[in-house]
Amino acid sequence: KTGAPRCGALAPAFALPDVARAADAAPVRLRAWRQRRPVLLALLPTSAGEQRLAWLRALAYRRADLDEARAVTLAIIGGDLEAVRALWRRADVAFPLLADVTGNTLAAYLGAEDLQEMADLSSGPGEAGG
């Protein structure tokens, strides 16, 4: 079984585009933050649907607490670039939204089986692929 990383294990590396930046901008890399500040990763797969907007707004609401802890917030969002960019516009948040177009980064953090199970649950009864 391919599961999520264990507590205390080194977080999987990633390099993902920030939808607020120009298309030719360098991707955001975890290693750029790992040694300098605490990092809060918000992992929001496509299967979370409209709940992703609520989570992003809740994180933005708690920004003062995160700033006090000197933590940087990075939201990893499943979906294509344009869909994630549209979500960023709707959420109107100041932290980076990183598009995980392939889903590989979310799978590395959430575990491939757990990610598929969440997708199956969100598709409703009788609609899951398989």
Image: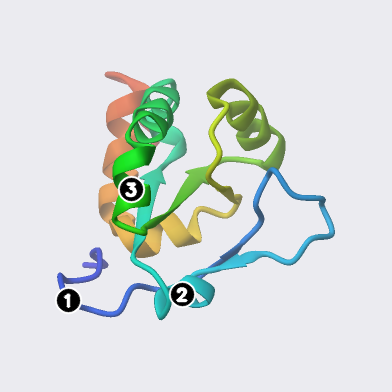
Amino acid of disc 1? Gly
Instruction: Residue 72: give x, y in percent of width and height.
Output: 43, 57
* Quadrant of the frame with the C terminus: top left
- Nearest to N terminus: mark 3 or mark 1: 1
Q: Are marks 3 and 1 in contact (CB under 8 Å)?
A: no
Q: Answer few, some or many: residues within 10 Å of disc 3's Cα (few below 14, many 20 plus, some between 14 and 19).
A: some
On residue 8, the disc is 1
| Residue at image point 65% right, 51% down | 18
Residue under label 2: 13
Name the residue located 32 percent from the left edge and 35 percent from the top edge. 62
Q: Which residue is mark 3?
A: 66
Marks 3/2: CA–CA distance: 22 Å
Using the rendered view, name the quadrant where residue 3 is placed.
Answer: bottom left
> What residue is rendered at 68% in x and 44% in y?
19
Disc on the earlier residue, 2 or 1: 1
Q: Is residue 125 visible?
A: yes
Location of the N terminus by quadrant is: bottom left
Rendering coords of residue 121 (x, y %): 27, 29
Determine crowd level at label 2: few under 14, some 14-19, many 20+ residues with C-alpha closer than 10 A. few
Name the residue at 41% across, 75% down. Answer: 34
At label 3, the amino acid type is: Leu
User: Decide: marks 2, 1 in contact (CB < 8 A)?
Assistant: no
Which of the two marks, 3 or 1, is nearer to us in this view? 3
> Helix, strand, or loop for circle 3?
helix
